[in-house]
Amino acid sequence: MSSLLKVILQRLGLGLLTLFAVSVIIAFVVELLPGDITEAILGQTATPETVAAFRKEIGLDQPAYIRYLDWLGGILTGDLGQSLASKRDISEFVGTRLSNTLFLGGLAAAIAVPLALLLGLLAALYRNSIFDRIVNFTTLTSISFPEFFVAYILILFLSVKAGIFPGISNVSTDLAFSEQFYRTLLPALTLTLVVLAHMLRMTRAAIINLLSSPYIEMARLKGTRPFRVIFHHALPNAWGPIVNVIALNLAYLVVGVVVVEVVFVYPGLGQLLVDSVSKRDLPVVQACSIIFAAVYILLNLLADIVSIVSNPRLLHPR
Amino acid sequence: MLKLFWTAPLSAKIGILTILAYAFVALFAPLLAPYAETAIVGGSYELWSDEYPLGTDNIGRDMLTRLIYGARNTIGIAFLTVALAFVVGGVVGMLAAILGGWYDMVIGRVVDILMAIPSLVFALLLLTVFGTSIPSLVIIIALLDSTRVFRIARSAAMNVVVMEFVEAARLRGEGMAWVIRKEVLPNIMAPLLAEFGLRFCFVFLFIAALSFLGLGIQPPLADWGSMVRENATLINYNDITPLLPAAAIAGLTVAVNFVVDWMLHLSSGLRSD
């Protein structure tokens, strides 16, 4: 048990280190620009006085490491800096945005995960059957669809033609939960379709991989009933890969949310990010990036740890 | 080559023919299109008619013309990006496999950290700093994507560089470029080609998403992603025209995926399952 704890602590440390490295990259991306970010944002015609004032405003008059430490200290104490465009404190409005995004992502995950596991398991069990072929063909096709294509098809059929859902998901905190749920359902459905195919294919591959191992064949050969083979022999070993698949796809979902939010004008973090990129509002972009990156890294870390816990062999790497 | 085509499964055949059709449209766009790429030829949002086969867009440009030129711009830029990503990622990956040691270690860690940032978020951050021009778009996405190519190229080349013939070549004093080009590259070509198809799909969808967000290929260039964005309001009036460029994107990606699926099947030694 102590060696397990050690490995987990190691992974956590590695994750923190990665997060630190990523924060350095996000903070110093500005330095990559030949010349100066002020020139790029204000344009060539800006007077030296405006440039100087702007540099002071975003703190460019200080050495890089001090700026980084200020920024990092601010994030750790919940102060994300000030937006260039609206002059408001970022931490004021980023909170509701984040909770909206997490609500949308959570709803999508709640639909997609059970569905993907069930269909993936069935496709693996009835491999090469008509059902499996149809699933294979459909998922391969839907992986190839751009997210906005899926979104607009759903809008066209469920919102414009059938009129079941609103085509715009302008949720706000003063709405009742049921109304918020109803308005979030269509974007969540879009995300479900986007992530379902990946999750299903990975589940299917993981299960097939498992079912071809010798001990399963042994269990079959000695006459164990198929039901018992699956639940008693296969499933305990399948949890690792399955949870891994889920965590990886949740990480994918966190990023896939950006385009879907823009289509449905959903007031989440992704839309904020895209708006700020077109306004070149660098502090907001940096804040959103670090939040997205942190969630992404945490989910990947979770996948890593779960697969170690469920598979003791990984405790002793070669 | 043609013999191989006839033995392909139906989905791969359809895929190959579709890719050829897209390539044809992209190459001969000026001959096929009824109007000029950026010409305003009528009122905005005109309906489908003999004059404008698919209607006109938000500022009165012919939809069909934009769709045809869009093939050229959208596919061309994605192809250029993937090619660049493969040159960078492939060379660095093969070098890491051949040189090993601290070079391999350092590059490997850098790639690990770059891959820890979701690529869409990273791309948006970089585009904020460098601005959304086509060169910066191509270079940023190519560099981000080359990390994935690096992984594949390195792991594939790892298995080759330990072979006797590579060792023999190095012992008889061949240079690094020669070893990469004549010994390693031919032996990892098959997995790299399949990966090229997959990466193309990914980058193609990625650029389409960026253009759809208004941060990719900029107007007045015709491009499928931004065409969806510009005309999206039509969907609320039960008009499917804005879905056509999106369907064009989906069609090509599906086709490439079908071909890649078949290639992976081929390179895995024609297993019967």
Image (cartoon, coloured by chain):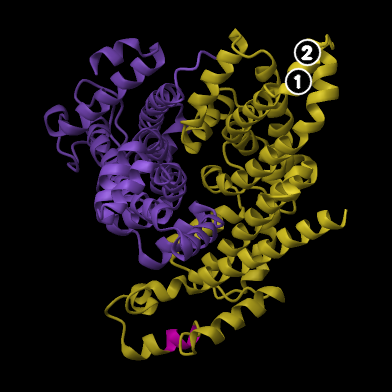
Chain colours: A yellow, B purple
Q: In which quarter of the image is the C terminus of chain B?
A: top right
Q: Mark 2 points at which residue?
A: A220
What chain letter is assigned to the residue under label 1? A
Please give the count of numbered marks on the rendered protein.
2
Residue A100 lies in the magenta stretch: no
Give me the disc on residue A92.
Answer: none
Q: How far apart are marks 1 and 2 (CA)?
A: 6 Å
Residue A54 lies in the magenta stretch: yes
Graded by Cα atoms within 10 Å as few (under 14), some (14 to 19) or many (20 or more), the crowding at tag 1 reads some
Say which of B116 and B134 sits in front. Answer: B116
Q: Do the residues labelled 1 and 2 touch (CB within 8 Å)?
A: yes
Say which of B76 and B150 sits in front. Answer: B150
Disc 1 is placed on an element classified as helix
Residue at x 59%, y 22% (from the top left corner): A162
Going by the numbered disc 1, the residue's amino acid type is Ile
What chain letter is assigned to the residue under label 2? A
**For the magenta stretch, what is the residue range?**
A53-57
Can I make out residue B230 in this image?
no
Q: In this view, does A192 lie above or below B136?
A: above
Say which of B126 and B59 sits in front. Answer: B126
Can I make out residue B54 in this image?
yes
Residue at x 36%, y 44% (from the top left corner): B226
Q: Position of residue B19 (x, y in %)?
A: 30, 25
Which residue is situated farthest in the right direction here?
A: A1
Q: Name the residue under label 1.
A: A216
Going by the numbered disc 2, the residue's amino acid type is Arg
The majority secondary structure of the magenta stretch comes to helix
Q: Quadrant of the N terminus of chain B?
A: top left
